[in-house]
Image (tube, coloured by chain):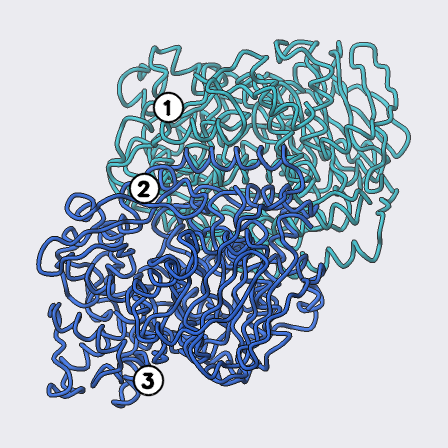
Chain colours: A blue, B cyan
Amino acid sequence: MYGWKGQILRVDLTSGAISKEALKIEDMHNFIGARGLGTKLFFDEVNPQVDPLSAENKLIFMTGPLTGTLATSCGRYNVVTKGPLNGTIAASNSGGCFGPELKFAGYDGIIFEGKSAQPVYLWISNQEAELRSAADLWGKTVVETTDLLREATDDDAKVACIGPAGERMVKFANILNEYNRAAGRSGVGAVMGSKNLKAVVVRGTGGIKVADNAGFLNAINDARGKLKAHPVTGAGLAAYGTNVLVNILNEHGTLPVKNYSEGAVFANAEKISGEYQAEHNLVRNKGCFGCSMGCGRVTKNHGKYQGIGEGPEYEATWGFGSDMGVDDFEAISKANFLCNELGLDSISMATTLACATEMTEKGIIPRDKSDLSWGNADAMIDKVRKTASREGFGDELAEGSYRLAELYGHPEYSMSVKKQEIPAYDPRGQQGTGLNYATSNRGGCHVRGYMTAPEILGIPVKVDPDATEGMPELLKIFQDLTAVVDSVGMCLFTTFGIGLPEIAEQYRTATGVNISDADLLQSGDRIWNLERLFNLQAGFSKADDTLPDRLLNEPMKGGPHQGKVVKLDQMLPIYYSIRGWDEEGVPTASKLEELSL
Amino acid sequence: MYGWKGQILRVDLTSGAISKEALKIEDMHNFIGARGLGTKLFFDEVNPQVDPLSAENKLIFMTGPLTGTLATSCGRYNVVTKGPLNGTIAASNSGGCFGPELKFAGYDGIIFEGKSAQPVYLWISNQEAELRSAADLWGKTVVETTDLLREATDDDAKVACIGPAGERMVKFANILNEYNRAAGRSGVGAVMGSKNLKAVVVRGTGGIKVADNAGFLNAINDARGKLKAHPVTGAGLAAYGTNVLVNILNEHGTLPVKNYSEGAVFANAEKISGEYQAEHNLVRNKGCFGCSMGCGRVTKNHGKYQGIGEGPEYEATWGFGSDMGVDDFEAISKANFLCNELGLDSISMATTLACATEMTEKGIIPRDKSDLSWGNADAMIDKVRKTASREGFGDELAEGSYRLAELYGHPEYSMSVKKQEIPAYDPRGQQGTGLNYATSNRGGCHVRGYMTAPEILGIPVKVDPDATEGMPELLKIFQDLTAVVDSVGMCLFTTFGIGLPEIAEQYRTATGVNISDADLLQSGDRIWNLERLFNLQAGFSKADDTLPDRLLNEPMKGGPHQGKVVKLDQMLPIYYSIRGWDEEGVPTASKLEELSL
């Protein structure tokens, strides 16, 4: 099969042994690549009941067959493991150029297993791969680590590493490549830290062959034309990045405020918007490998929070902004810079702080422990630092909002699903998003089926976000298609402008695999069900497919969706049914047979 | 190919010659059947510029491969011709048992050509077919004609005939089979009248073979289960018929009032609703051949308009009700009974009366000619009679609203598209329906792409009816899928509960044609484009893809969509583009090549 290198590295961190293995053609067919194939390999090798931070857990870096090709925005790789934040199957994906560079070096992926006795990093230079000591790097920030490793290896090397947060196994530590691109969620950085693996450094100079050069170029040309023609992928993302959503969500009335405790309209939204950012703080925009959209923001703070870095993305802007009652864009940006430097998932960090702030304001967390209050940016920024270092109250924050709230006897203040913090879209005004949060295979997550597209942006069609009719059916398609996109190695943002036909045609012409659009989408269904099976075997059940009580029973306090709650009980049984699952949310035998699982 | 009989009748009404012909396999493959295949045969044989009421026009009765089988609600046939109301390609379809009976007699369809010198009817008894004199039937109502023909032939014969309106070539005369089932629109009854063909009478006792008995039964079982489980197809249609829509549309604010001149909310909607009908006038419900939904209403009037018959369907209830300012259900029902007895399309009849009423109220039509006024039920009923007989002012009404309004110098009061009257959904509160009206290949029509399903009923998903995002894309799918449904011989109402996969599986197992879901849907696209080509060659252009000025420029006066107009200019260019048409709405060479047209 073309598109692939057909080879992966296996790195035993306990023994230090490194070997090369071939991928199985059948798995490549059935699970596409990246997220799907990584999950398949993980499922075959690891007991779902493993302790995520033990040596028995594994950590898989996996690219897709289109990663590193000139297909639309295919710079992505996935990190698959059992995540320590909540114990679900984790597949965190990231852009930039790390994934392509790994392909150029000759590998589709890397399986890390065991645990190193000392801090190490993996250095890959084309067909050479070795583990080296990272003793001098331990404790360094992501920026420092990346700089030092490029100096030590090759200026053009791509570095994926953890920061101090990952070393200290903060439950929502992430992995960053090329300074600012993050495999952000589920705490994959903590797994890396638990294995004493500080970084993976790659330099590759090879190429990638595709099956049908002319057909592939035609497919790319068609898809790029559509991305260029669409207002979101052709203009909006380049102009304002993902922060274009701030004003849109605020106007729609689903921009959560103060830990979801108020009507989802923020008085000063304009001051934290993408438009504000573009006028005051934008240095330039930036694209990942082979991307025509360029949503990345290089941002400079000028005042007391001065500094330069990337982001914040919409979710971080919301999290450190309206969800914390903060309307100072540079303070938000500073908190985000720190997350990138220290290796923290900004969504879980911010939402954990919002949870802590609400409990502090309510007197549940004593004031001598927490100085957090709504709108107090300095206290917020201070806690980001302390979380990464697990210093004082930061050690409690480092466990995430669910464990924190439970510790104080009020788990209901954790805005999380399956212990993972939910992001920046109040589902009481977006019913489909509520169902997506409840059913996402990695817990609270927006990008497993981005229902904001139809509910607010009108892509591919503008659905009524207060209605439940058809939401389960639409969500299933979104979830399955997202599994395809993540697995070929493509950026999800392409799907604002192109759909299954364009993605499938790029896949077919690149790989030479003659698969119909419908069968490719069914592979997404297969991946979704494999992830479900893992979680069921890990101990999750129907009872976990739910939402925080606040979203189910506390009517929205203001805005266009005032009085609404998420009607999950109207949607979940239908969702199970169309997924081919029984009433307990378990895939039926016939469904598994249909998917050859 | 199974499902088919493979044989059609050709009846030359000029010479009286009747012959049998085989269908071409290639056409059966590419155009599915019924609407699609009928259009293909018509297009191959008739000049698009033909005068619809001349002997050179042809009239094709065509069934689909599933017609008469036990597939879900497959009792339908299509009448294809060039319609005299507006000169577009007409494909009017009807249910009941006439289509199945024709298949049982051994024919997939009948092509009528030429013109008989004297009134005749065609009598088919299995393989025997003969033209007989209809001299004694001329002038008879549909009920009288049907009764007399069953007496003259066979008690179990199925009769499709015209009433006095068709004989007099009222521009919107229809064809009725089994008393009350109508091939309603485009004036197909006038074409039948122009040929001096009063009726087609069929008795058939044969069967229909399917390719894969077990597979077909499985497919039916699956689809029927879904129809039963869905609230609309499993309960709503049986309980209240299509009039269940009256209260729903009124609440939604798109039930047009007084020729679309007021906000689309009718004060007394409850009194003309399906719920009212069920309580006061329903005798029993009734289903067509092989139908599990049973939406038909046998209705009895008790007061001054007493009588018994079928209907009214939602569109007639609206047309003779809120659109005429009438809130007396039995008066509406009486007007509808008369349409059925006299052979008139109730949508065009009612909308033409509403147009005439507005012009009378405004003093444009003199009072000595018209006594119509809003809410005057008796004047309305009187005009239905006079239209069928072309008596007095009825002769002007018989030309339809567009010619009537133009006659008085005010075509803007005709609520029509391409001269065909639009039905019961104000598109200023249903943007997708507006685009459907503007682009329907037979002019103003709701069932060429029933966007009320997603816009109001939430099927398959609840879209925002005031938004335009994604509407062109969604409409294309609806239009193409509808072409498939109409062409296999299935009732469109099934699509509330089942979709392409269930329809395709029934088609495949019945016919043995191994076609993918996607390719079957593409056949729908092919049919749509063939109809478009006919219309373009008949002289229609982009300028005809529009709406009455009132809907584009006169903001809605009240209700939930107050202030809205149809944003057609935002949708039409996108629609052309995704259809693969150029900026003038002409299919591109590459699109035609893709469809093998």
Q: Residue at (20%, 86%) from the top-left corner?
A: A392
Q: Nearer the viewer, residue A469 or A105?
A: A105
**Which residue is disc 3 drawn over?**
A403
Q: What secondary structure is found at the residue carrying circle 1?
A: loop
Q: CA distance from mark 3 to mark 1?
A: 62 Å
Residue A6, by quadrant, is bottom right
**Which residue is disc 2 drawn over?**
A238
- Residues marked 1 and 2 touching at CB (< 8 Å): no
Viewer-side label of 2, 3: 2
- Residues marked 3 and 1 touching at CB (< 8 Å): no
Say left or right for B268 vs B220: left
* Mark 2 on the same chain as mark 3: yes
Crowding at dot 3, Cα within 10 Å, few <14 / some 14-19 / many 20+, comes out as: some
Three-letter code, disc 2: Ala
Q: What secondary structure is found at the residue carrying circle 3?
A: helix
Viewer-side label of 3, 1: 3
Three-letter code, disc 3: Arg
**Which residue is disc 1 drawn over?**
B548
Q: Tell me if residue B319 comes above or below residue A117 in the rendering.
A: above
Q: CA distance from mark 2 to mark 3?
A: 38 Å
Residue A67 seen from this side: yes
For the N terminus of chain B, the image quarter is top right
